[in-house]
Image: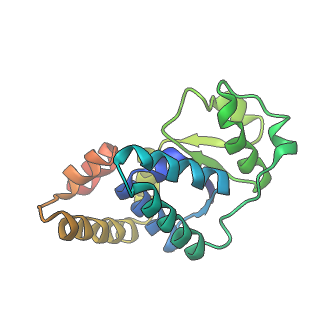
Amino acid sequence: MRAVLDACVLYPTVLREILLGVAARGLYEPMWSDRILREWTRATDKIGPGAMAQAEGEALVVKAAFPRASVREQPNIEARVTLPDPNDEHVLAVAVACHADAIVTFNAKDFPRSVLAEFGIERRDPDGFLWELWSRNPAEVAAVIEGVRATAERLSGEDWPVRRLLKKAQLPKLGKALSV
């Protein structure tokens, strides 16, 4: 399965680490454009000084880790698609160009299922997307999440039970499934 990751799912660190961790295990193929990565890094500017520079460094690491994930921007396709927010049309254009199965995003209102269906693409919220991957590969996804959880504890110096961490990452369904 090939999925375009929208900037809004790359911005939260825990979510990004889980999505890329399961991709590194071969459970799906992540896709993006340089513009999507720039949107992610620019969004971190609101955190404070130095955050954007750190995110730009992380984006370079991500690009190196997934060299086949980068898709050139597609102005010719972008000109043919229409979404409620024209600023999101580049994401759909990338998905069309790379023959993606899905766009993983929190932004449901700007990616109407009916428009995406015309191109054979689904909109997937990250919780449902990761839950589905977990339901097919529970040990693989759980191992990734445990690694992310351990890193969060090490970096923050506080305990992060899985369910609490995943709820904070806007993955409540997955958190509930892993806590049963």
* Residue shown at 71% from the left, 49% from the top: 95
Quick one: quadrant of the N terminus?
bottom right
Q: Indicate the quadrant where residue 148 lies.
A: bottom left
Q: Vertically, is 64 above or below 114?
A: below
Q: Is residue 173 visible?
A: yes
Q: Which of 101 and 98 lies nearest the eye of the viewer?
A: 98
Q: Vertically, is 106 above or below 104?
A: above
Percent position of residue 138, x then y:
37, 65
Q: Which of 133 and 31 lies nearest the eye of the viewer?
A: 31
Q: Is residue 129 visible?
A: no
* Residue shown at 71% from the left, 42% from the top: 90
Percent position of residue 93, x then y:
76, 44
Relative to 87, is 159 on the left or the right?
Answer: left
Question: Residue pushed farthest left?
Answer: 158
* Residue shown at 25% from the left, 48% from the top: 176
Question: Residue pushed farthest front?
Answer: 49
Total number of numbered labels? 0
Percent position of residue 120, x then y:
74, 43
Which colour assignment does the render follow? rainbow
* Residue shown at 76% from the left, 28% from the top: 82
Q: Indicate the quadrant where residue 178 lies.
A: bottom left
Quick one: quadrant of the C terminus?
bottom left
Percent position of residue 65, x then y:
55, 75
Question: Residue pushed farthest right?
Answer: 76
